[in-house]
Image: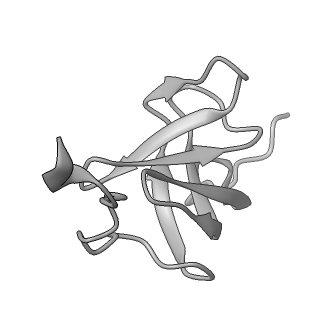
Amino acid sequence: MSERHGYHGNYRPKPVKQGAEYTLKVEEMSKRNDGVAKVNGFIVFIAGGKLGETYRVKIVKVGNRYAVGEIVSNEQAKPETQEEEE
């Protein structure tokens, strides 16, 4: 209908900002095998993300319906204490 003409869905503020870093857990996988995390219901695609893993992610692109992030570090790869195997 004519009321929706010109509406692009960008009236709601986005919960992420380009260039900012967030700690996100991959909750699902996309059809392109990217990790999918959510920030307040807003989808963030994480290239190279694996299901169930938690990453420090830098947002590189923010669209109207989703964002794209790059992995800065794997938060689960940082053990609190390292033990040597003998």
Give the answer, above or below, for where 78 lies relative to 13: above
Q: How is the image coloured?
A: one colour
Q: Residue at x 55, y 60 (%)?
A: 80
Give the answer, above or below, for where 41 lies relative to 56: above
Does residue 77 appear to the left or right of 54 in the view shown?
Answer: right
Q: Residue 48, how many percent across, how many down?
A: 77, 38
Q: Residue at x 59, y 44 (%)?
A: 45
Check the image and name the residue furthest to the top: 31
The C terminus is located in which quarter? Answer: top right
Q: Residue at x 79, y 45 (%)?
A: 84
Does residue 35 appear to the left or right of 65 in the view shown?
Answer: right
Give the answer, above or below, for where 22 lies relative to 67: below
Q: Quarter of the image holding residue 81? A: bottom right
Q: Residue 68, how many percent across, how many down?
A: 63, 55
Q: Nearer the viewer, residue 86 or 68?
A: 68
Q: Nearer the viewer, residue 40 or 77?
A: 40
Q: How many marks?
A: 0
* Res. 11 visible in picture: yes
Check the image and name the residue furthest to the right: 86
The N terminus is located in which quarter? Answer: top left
Q: Residue at x 56, y 25 (%)?
A: 51
Does residue 41 appear to the left or right of 43 in the view shown?
Answer: left
Q: Nearer the viewer, residue 71 or 36?
A: 36
* Res. 74 visible in picture: no
Q: Quarter of the image holding residue 75? A: bottom right
Q: Quarter of the image holding residue 11? A: bottom left
Q: Residue 57, how many percent across, how many down?
A: 61, 63
